[in-house]
Amino acid sequence: EHENVSQSTSPINLESMWLANQVLTVPLTEREHEILALIAQGLSNQQIAEQLFIAVSTVKRHINNCYGKLSVTSRSQAILKAQQLQLV
């Protein structure tokens, strides 16, 4: 018998991610969602890069992509918008 695996161990809730992406003109990627969640936890670009094993420049690129897709210009605006859309 199969166990119920609808609860993801990932901090990203796929249902809320899907719903939020219906609101956005250009949907966020899974990596962008992940980085937004880490920003909301207060991590710096350097800390995010270390945690995800990617370059700081890659983190910055993902953050800038998020800003454009969310129509915001700062980390605090991105966090607020992500919370409003239930992304974090």
Image (cartoon, rainbow, N blue to C red):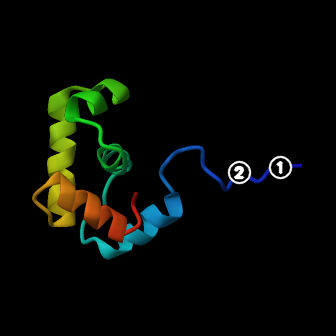
Residue at image x 47%, y 51%?
Answer: 12
How many numbered marks, from 0 up? 2
Q: Nearer the viewer, residue 38 or 59?
A: 38
Q: Secondary structure at mark 2?
A: loop
Determine whether label 1 and label 2 are within 8 Å by CB.
yes
Residue 81 image offset from top left, x and y in percent? 27, 66
In this rendering, the answer to whether 16 lies above or below 74 is below
Residue at image x 27%, y 58%?
Answer: 79
- Residue bearing mark 2: 5
Residue 19 image offset from top left, x and y in percent? 44, 71
Residue 69 image offset from top left, x and y in percent? 20, 62
Residue at image x 43%, y 62%?
Answer: 17
In this rendering, the answer to whether 60 lies above or below 15 is above
Spot the residue most to the bottom: 23
Q: Is residue 85 rendered to the left or right of residue 68?
A: right
The quadrant in which residue 44 appears is top left
- Residue bearing mark 1: 2
Tell us which disc is closer to us: 1 or 2.
2
Residue 53 image offset from top left, x and y in percent? 33, 24
Which amino acid, mark 1?
A: His
Q: Secondary structure at mark 1?
A: loop
Which amino acid, mark 2?
A: Val
> Which label sits on residue 16?
none
